[in-house]
Image (tube, grey):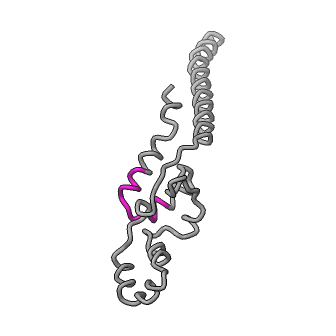
Amino acid sequence: MFNNHVTFWRSFFSSPLQELKRTYKLISDLSIEFNRNLNEDHTFLLFSEHELGEVMMGCLGEVMRGCLGEVMRGCLGEVMRGCLGGLADSYLDALERAADGRYKVTLEYPHYHPLMKRCHNPESRRKMETAFHSRCKEVQSE
């Protein structure tokens, strides 16, 4: 009777155990494929300087108050660029430019996170978030 009992339990647990191993293997394979697809994704969005951050009123007021002489000497572009929605000059300088002068912003983390954190233009953040959460949509649905 003991042999039958052991045999029974072994057969009872072996099937679910094998199924569990197959499920873990499938999850692992799908995870590897998903990460490979994300790494191969080269989607980017194009943004103008205005879309990356609107000129804030505080900066505009400062220009009108104290920098008028400098503005007259031609530094308006630099003053305004310093007011772009919190995005650092180093971030903007690192972005590739399209033929029409707009910035190419990829969906990779070094481009995505600073834009989402520091860009004051809600429409640009919405576009970026929608694209980011739709990465590899066509590939993953096949």
| Magenta segment, prevailing SS (helix, strand or loop) | helix
Magenta stretch: includes residue 85: no
Quarter occupied by residue 97: bottom right
Q: Quadrant of the N terminus?
A: top right
Q: Nearer the viewer, residue 15 or 79?
A: 79
Q: Which residues are magenta?
A: 115-127
Out of 48 and 92, give the one closest to the viewer. 48
Q: Is residue 116 magenta?
A: yes
The percent position of residue 3, horizontal first and vertical second, equals 66, 11
- Tell me residue 55's x, y (percent): 38, 71
Residue at figure coordinates x 61%, y 18% from the top left: 14
> Which residue sits at x=45%, y=59%?
48
Residue 123 left/right relative to 70: left
Residue 77 at what x, y percent from top left?
47, 74
Residue 47 appears left or right of 56:
right
47 vs 84: above or below? above
Q: Is residue 100 above or below residue 65?
A: above
Q: Quadrant of residue 4?
A: top right
State how many labels appear.
0
Q: Quadrant of residue 50?
A: bottom left
Q: Residue at x 44, y 51 (%)?
A: 128
113 left or right of 54 in image: right
